[in-house]
Structures are given as C-alpha cells and as structure tokens.
Amino acid sequence: MIDPVTLAVLKGRLEQIADEMDATLFRSAFNPIIAEAHDASHGLYDARTGETLIQGKSGLPIFVGAMAFAVKAVIDKVAQDAARAGGALSDGDVFLFNDPYDGGTHLSDFKLVRPFFRDGRVFCYLASVGHWHDVGGNVPGNYNPVATECYQEGMLIPPVKLFAAGRLNQDIVDIVMANSRQPRSLYGDLNGQINALDLGAQRLAALLDEMGAATVTEALAELKARAARLMRANIAELPDGTYSAEDWLDNDGIVDAPLRIALDIVKRGDTMKLDFSRTAAACAGPVNIARSTAIASCYVALKHVFQDVPANAGCLEPIEFAIPENSLLSATRPKPVGGYTETILRVIDVVFQALAAAAPHKVNGCAYGTINALSLAGHRKNGQRWVMFSFFGGGHGGHPEGDGLNHGNAPISTATIPPVEILEAAYPVMFTQWALRPDSGGPGRARGGLGAVYEVTPLDGEADAFLFAERGRFPPRGVCGGGDAAMNGFRFEQDDGWHAAPMASKMVGIRLKRGQRLRIESPGGGGYGPAAERDPAKIAEDVRLGYVTAEAAARDYGPNAK
Amino acid sequence: MTADPSANNRSRITVGVDVGGTYTDLFFYDEATGRSSTAKVPSTPGNQAIGFLDGLAQRANDLSRIGTIVHGTTVGTNALLERKGAPIGVVTTKGFRDVLEMRRRDRPRTWGLWGQFAPVVPRDRRIEVNERTLADGTILTPVDPAEVKAAAKLLLERGAQAVAVFFLNSYANGANERAAVAALKDVWPNDCINASSDILPEIREFERASTTALNAYLQPVVGAYIGSLEERLRGGGFGGQLLIVQSNGGVMTVDTAKSRPIRTALSGPAAGVIAGAHIAAAAGFPNVITGDVGGTSFDVALVVGGRSALAAETKIDFGLVVRTPMIEMTTIGAGGGSVAWVDRGGLLQVGPQSAGSDPGPACYGKGGGAATVTDANVVLGRINAERPIGGKLARLDVAASRAALDADVGKTLGLGTMEAAEAVIRVANALMAGAIRLVSIERGHDPKRFALMPFGGGGPLHAGALIQDVGLAQAIVPRFPGVTSALGCIVADMRHDFVRTINRPLDALDVPALDRDIVAFAGEGASLLDRAEVAFAGRETQIEFDMSYVGQTHTVSVPLVLQIARGASGVTGEAIRAAFDAAYARAYGRLLQGVPVRLLNLRVAVIGRRPPFDLAALKPDPANTLDGARRGSRKLWIDGAWRDAPVFARLDLPAGATIMGPAVLEQPDTTIFVDPGLSARVDALGNVILERR
C-alpha cells in the first residue's frame, strides 16, 4: 500500500497540474466569461470510466462533477468508432464537443478531451472545458429565454477529433468559427484550451517519469477511496431518516407557470439516496437540465456542506440518485437547456434545505439563487454593433458563524463581476447606481447577506435588453428557522414610466431609449436560525448602517428591534 | 526633513533596522572603516520606536555619528492584518458608496459559503455627493464644494481622522476629485486627505477605492509612528536621513511614507528579498528563490537576473486589495509553528493552523500540546534542544514534543515517534516545495538555473530537502540569515512608481500624449530623488506597458527601453508593437495573427541606485580554522536510523571549508541541517553553499 506521506505529496503535485492548466487558460482567454469569471475547468479523468481523478481548484465548481460525464461520452464514442469502423485511439488525439445531453451543462461550454498515453496505453484523460462567448443561436451570448429547442440555442457539436495523432483538423476550426458571432474570441479561447492540454500532458509526463506510473496509479485509487471514506464518515454522523425540501422556479420563459424541484434525502447508515421523483416534468423553455448536470449540481452542494472531502469521484460513491426519465432534471434532445444555471442553483438550494434538518451545524441559508444574466445590445453612432453581457450578483445565506456575505458570487462559480469602469469604457452605457440593497437579506439569528441594486442606462442611442434570471416569484429560503430573503426585482423605464418584467424574471428585447433606466434589485441570502434569537445589538447596528430599515426591523424582529 | 547635508557627509554610519513581530534586527555599517555589526533586541509592540532606539543604543550611543537610517517596518502590515488602522471617512459619487463593501463580487473560498467581510470603513462613514465623470473624461455633473464640506462635517462628527475621496471614472479625469480635495482642505483638521486619482489613476473602481481607502486607513497610524520615531531620533542627536523601505523593495523619504503609507504594506519582507538578491548576486547567483520560514508561514519570492519580480496587485486579506507594485510574494501557512494533524480520511496534514509563539510548539513547554514542525525537528535532533535560537527560552522540552507527535500523528497513522516526526517533516517540505514550484516551474522558469536562499530562523533546516525535492541547483545560506531584512535596508535603492490608464487600441494611440506622460512621470520621479538629499550612485527610469490583444482582459507586462533626453522619450508605436510581440511570445508561446493590440496602462519607475554595500565586510575571520569550529557531535535521526553527525559553529568556519552531510551548523539565529548526500561549502564571503555531492 502507498504510504500516507507519498500520497499527500502526490495529491499536491497532481492538483498543481490541474491548477496550472486552469491558470494558463484564464490568462490567455479572450472572452471575459473565462478570463474574469473563470467559467472553465481542467482535470484528470479515469481511463476506463471517465470518473474525476483530480480537478483544478480554481475552475468553475459545477464542472467538477459534469466533466466526468463529458469524458465518458468520449470513451463511449471511441468504443463505438472501434466497433463500427475499427478506428483506434492514438496518442495526440484531441476530441472537441459541446453536446449538453451527454456531457452536461449547456451549448456554450466547449469541451476538449485528450487521451494521455503511457507505455502504449491510455493512462488517463486530460480535459478542458470553457464557456465560449457566442456559439450561434437566436440570442447573442446564448442566454435565450424563449428557446423551445436546442437548435435555437446554438450549434451542437458531437465528439469529433480536433487533432488526430497530433495533427490539427483545420476544417473543424473553420466550422465552429463560421457558426459564431464572435469568431475571433472563439479562436483565442480554443487556442488557450489547446495550450492548457499541452501543458497538462507535459507536466503529467514529467511527474510519471519522476514518481513512476504505478505509484501514481496507486495514489489516484487511494485518493478516491479516501474521498469515499470521508464522505461516508460525514454521512454516518447524521441521524438516519428522510429529509425533504421543495422549491420552485418562476417559469420556463415560455409558459408562465412555476416548476417544482423536490428532493427527498433518504439517509441510512453511511449512505444517502437523493430522490428527485417529485420534481416537475421536462418543460418547454430552456430551464431543463440533463441528468449528468443534475448529479453534478448535487456534488457542488455536498462539497459546500462537506468541505473536507477532496474533489474526486469518491465523493459520490456512497450516494444514490433517483431522477425519473423526462423530468426537468433529465432532459434529452432537443429539449432546450440554455438556462441550466437557474435550475442547478435551485437543485443546490433544495439540497441545503433538506440537509438543514439533518445537519443544522453544517448548512447555511440559501444564496441569491439566480445567475442574473443581462445582455444589453445596440449600435454605436458609427453603426458598429455592441453587446454588453454580464452576470449580476446577490447575497449569501446566514450561517452558524455569522451573517451571510453581502454581494457574493453564485455557489456554482467563483466568478468576479467586471468593474463598472471597465463596462462604461467598453460600452456606451452609464450606471446610475451600484449599491447594496437594504432589507434584501433574510432575517434570522444570522441574517442573510444583502443583494444589490444595479441601475444602468444607454448613453448613445437605443439599446435592447435581454434578461435571464429567476427568484422573481419565489424568494431564497432561510434554514433552521431563518426567514426568506427579498425576491429578485426587475424594472425598466419607458416613455410612460416604470414597468416590471413581463415574466417576473425574464425579458427579451426590451427597447430602452437614451436616459431610460433598467434596474435590477437582486435577492439577498436566506437567514439562519430564528429571527427572535438575533442579538438586539446587531439589529440596532443593522438599522444604524442601513442594512435593514427601521420598518423592516420592526416587522421581522418585533420586540427585539429598538 | 531638515537634514543638514554637510552633517550627512561627515557621518558615515548607515544602519538598517527591521522591526518584526518578535525581534528588532539591526545592521550597522561604517563606510569609513568598512566594518559592520549586528544587533537583535526584543520588539516593543505598543510603540515600535522604543525597541528601535534600544537597538540603536546597543552599538551606537552617539546618534549624531549615524548618517543614514533605513527602516523596514511592520506597523502598516500589522494595522492592516489586525484591522487596527484609524477611523476614516469616504466621500464618493452618488449611487456608489458601497463599492468598497461589494468588492468584485467574490467569496473567500471556492468550497463553503460561510464567508464574511467587514470593510475598513463602515457604511455610515461613506458619504455620497452629486458629481459624475464619464468614461471618456467628460464631466457630466461638476462637484459642489459646499456639499463636500457638509459631508466632511458629518464624517468628522462620526469620528473620521482621515478621508478618502473616490469618484467614478476619476482615472480618466481627476478634476472633480481635485475640486473636492480643495474643499476638504478648508475644513479638514489634518493633512490626511486622499484623492483616488492621485493615489492610483488606474481604471477599475474597486481596486482604486480599496487602495485609496487603505492608504487613508494607515495614514494616522503610520504617520504617528514615524513622527514619534523621528522625534526620538532627533532628540537623541540624530541629524541624518531617515528612509523607509517600500513594498516594491525601494526606499522612500519619511515625507513620502507619511502621505503614502500603503506603500509600506510589505516593507519588512521586501527588505529581506532585496538583501537576498544582493547577497546572491555577490556570491555569483543572479537567479534565486528566497524562502523565509517564520513561525506561521513560508514566504517565497523570485529573483531573476538580480531583480525581484513585482506584482501589480496584492490581496492583504479577503477584500483588502492593494494595487501598488509590491515584491511578488507567495505565502503558504507552513512554518515552524504549523500544526501537524490527521484528517478524517487518514491523510497527514501540516498547517495552516499554527501554534503561534504563545503557547507555541509543544517543546516550548507552555502547555501548547500540539505537534508542530518545530517539534518534529527537535525530536529528529536537528534543532539543539539545549540551545534554542533567539535566547528567550533556556531549553526545549523534547519529551513534550515526542508526546505531542505520538498523540496527534503516530497513534492515528500507526507510526512510531521517529517515523511520525519524519513524516511531518516530509509533508511540510512537500508544501514548501509546492510553493517554490508555484513561483518557478509554473511561471516557466527552469529550477536547475535557480538557487534557494533560505532565511528566517527555520529556513536553513529545510533548505537541503527543498533543493532535492524541487531540483534546484544549490542553496545559499547567507551569513546572518536572522538579520537578512535589516541588511536589505542597507542595500535597497530609492524607487518611485507611477501609473496611468491609457486604454486605447495601439493603432489609435496618441503617441505625443503618451510621450508627454512618460516625460512628466520621469521628471516627477527625478525631483523626488533630488528632494531626498541622498547621494545616489546612479539613476534609472524603467518604462513598462500593460498590453493585450483587443478582446482579452488579462494583460502582459511589456518593458520598453527608452532614453529620455531634451524633454522627449522617443517612444513610437512600432517600438511598442515589437516589444508587445516579444513579451507575448515569452508568456504564451504563439502570437495571434490578425488580431489588433491594446495598451491599457503606462507604468514608469524611477530608481536612484544607492551606493553599493560590499559584502566582503561580512566575510569570515581569516584566522578561522575547521577544527576551531568543531563543537563535537550529536545523534540525528536520518532515514530511519540514529546517526552520529558532527556539529560546527557556523560563524567560526573558515572560507573554503567543505563539510559533508550529515552535519549540523549552528549559529545564534539559525541552524543549518546538511542532509546526507549534500555538502556544505563556505564561500569567500562567508555564505554556506549547500549542493549535491
């Protein structure tokens, strides 16, 4: 058996390889969604099953779970090719694809998967995924709130060989570039991903030379076993029982009716079953997700709660999933999946809520629970087209150690928001407010963090606004007796005054004139613990600093509010 | 400053003073005689000036004989880390008072959502005024001085002692900020007034606001400290020049330090890196990685070709961002006091928790009980339990170390005491090696071209293992590892950095305007050097651009060599493009065809080279002999067995001596462990070079 010290050393070395691949792409990417928002990920995957072996620490958390399915899709494709045409995998092959049903997430995420050979056999796979700026479809930036089929959301590329035995197939590059509104950005990002895979292969080869392939293989197996053991230990500490929660999406953008996401966690001994049977059926609009994406989002939620478990496939070993076919969480082609972020955030919320009863000391109130994708597009005076696309933030939930973080990023990502000054320098827009939103955090012993108010107007002629969001009708929930946060609010000015978003949280092509403002009031986080238990001094401080208004304090905290 | 230059010329003693958390280290150098000496006194945390003066008194009872004092200080660093700056106020654009608190919408850790953040200035001391500047510099709404004065009144009522003004887009036009500052000067009771366009005229509002606010936050604290220090020095008869080390590794005058205290955020560590670069270059190693092993952390910095790398931005803590050039330092939580523990998956871990200095490692016998890296070194015999460094403790409690290792590591992993101690050292070494890889291999540097320079009390214990782990060529242990930062104060140059955001595609660049900016910054830097009244051995102006392809958000640093003469720099678009291509190719390999290029920021550094310090002053006494340095032997646990290893008094070794490992070299401020398979050679300057046999 591998000694624990060598194991600890190898764990660090392997993680460093994935981290370095992340860093290479972040620094050289063209599109800010990768470069600033880090919507990308890299790792090492099992040669036979595609399971995650090692994942970089700086990539997008949701990909940690999803990439295993992407690599498996390539492994299946290779097996198919071998059976069909006798084609074999060679050293230097790199597959490219964005099929969201096999590999998870949505069409914007392009995956590059490369077998890593050692002594004539596949030792493992290296993979890179990155969110490309534009992959075709009806709406620039691909957040199309009214898509009813994936074909409206962009191009769909199945696993194809971008490189065959080290030789680039330029035809494929030409095809994907021809299908994008931003071909140059795509070209830059694709190059960055290729560089990251090259670098990973070099580093891994050097490590195997130094430590021996057998030792590294043993270490990888042992790391997985330990993650499983640690997850089992975490689960075993919870009382046996069934823990249920349900939450809702506002609508699917097509039909204005709420969609239920329900979870029953059945916990026995050191295993858990996550049962989503009571969840809504697949819907017409783009908030469906593939089964692999649903599992990946559970993984993210569990990693937030059980932080000491290393990020590899062992994490999920003691966990069974029940996701019925044709559910909102197991969509198949051609159901649209472009708004997958909203659904996975809600899956994470129900995991937190269900676990709250079993592990109150480990959870937190729900975070703001929406990606708030806003796109503003127009033409400059010189006729040039501009598209500003960004995700807006909100509050995090209260937790056992204190109040929630104000203005945080989504639990599925580590993205930062672009500075106002960068946006104003790059696009003809002016922000009139960029501030914390009072009364948006859920009340509780630990109050939820505050969401934000963002107000923006076009400076140079007209602009069309597209918004893809959620939490317009169902607030982020508190846990363990904590109160709910404020809901998302969208308003915009027209000649006759202020209007609300027609589907509460989704808008398509709303025309704004110069000086007419669009306002996002984003949700805070849910509270933790009963409001009645909040320290009166903290309530008074909140009122003094304007995090909570006096009226809201009197309403939510009653006699404790002075 | 009222220094009399003639007095400056008469007194030739230069003193470097580094005030750390535990000790104040001093380095005295007499230019007339070429002699140097060191002193170490306990720091006085309440008022560092007291320890400072105590230290000076050890070697120089007549302060009038001292010409220059160069000071590395942690007053600013500690105020930031412990959140003990002054109460400050902020005046800002209507609609944007929460920028400091909203940050860039991040969170402290990838996994886990339990983050919290309190900005250094609470919400009720951030006041909005009506004003607006657009991204192109147009003033949409001028600022009203009366409104600013009303805001100031409110801030003063609420206890603010310093004020920061930051208006949106002021990097593009600082007129509104300047008008606000003019209004503030009428009502503000002190000089602690800061405009963001003055502190950092660079795009990105949070980073600019944070840097400006943190500068204000430090002004009263650092200003009071430096003021009191100056007063005591003058009172003691000191008539020379007092200089402060900046985080960029250069020094500045006390006046600059009082108005720009944020530049002292990494003053102490920067001095150490500067010394490391100097010592290594003198010993023939232009490429070194410095590694400072302290009680709780391991700080690594890279020196290439004798120059330390600078980072444009540093995060002091979550949400505390400082955007001024600082020595690029990678810090991990692995030091002598780092605690060893076994996680629930059965994996041995070291740090990041630390036993600190109180209770400290188990061997301190203060009832700490936790097994630390130091305890492992004690048990293995590498640290002499009978003569602990620093002189605060009489002896170390080996039994307590053994018990702690058994309880925290051995029992869980099924290892004996000695095996557990070895395992802790291996994991600690692996962590430190990871940090070294991060700054070297990960940035494309071949480790074989680098030497490691360990300093701090613990560095030389781990150096041998680290060079083997990472594949570094050698380790060079300076003669006085414990006072390296104080020595760095003596050798640091004077340096002033300037930045301006340009943000234009290269083909639309206003080259004459850029030329004017370069010349203006160079002139401003030169006049700052003139005013410092320091004799420089030479001057240099470095010009650098932050550039990218249009569409990229990350930039590469593009240095360009220009000669400024007759009010012109001679800069051209072609020269910039060629320099960009070269820098991009170095960073990423291939250039992208047909994609236009953008120039984001201009950076100018003006450097005054201080007179060189000859390290020969520190070389070993020629009368030293190898035998004279022998101090018997002691049992060390190495690779699973006890072995007898010779012990030497390091400072008594002669130049040219070579000692085969295993061996231990002891000196008052550190212990050098020579691993088996390595040799230790004393070079002509008295450095110990560890290398493979």
Image (cartoon, rainbow, N blue to C red):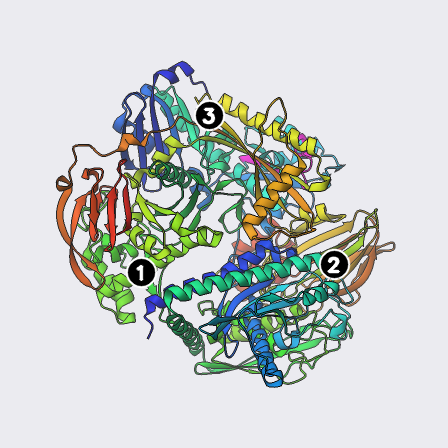
| Span of residues in magenta | B161-179
Check if residue B169 falls in the magenta segment.
Answer: yes
Residue B346, percent from left and from top: 35, 71
Check the residue under mark 2 and report the chain it is in.
A
- Give the residue at x 31% y 38%: B483
> Could you tell me if the residues under marks 2 and 3 are in contact, i.e. CB atoms within 8 Å?
no
User: Disc 2 designates what residue?
Assistant: A375
Tell me the kind of residue under disc 2.
Ser
Q: Which mark is residue B426?
A: 1
- Badge 1: residue crowd in 10 Å (few <14, some 14–19, many ≥20): many
Tell me the kind of residue under disc 1.
Arg
Q: Which mark is residue A548?
A: none
Depth check: give the residue in front, B181 or B420.
Answer: B420
Does B499 appear above or below B61?
A: below
In this rendering, which labeled residue sits more in front, label 1 or label 2? Answer: 1
- Give the residue at x 51% y 79%: A49
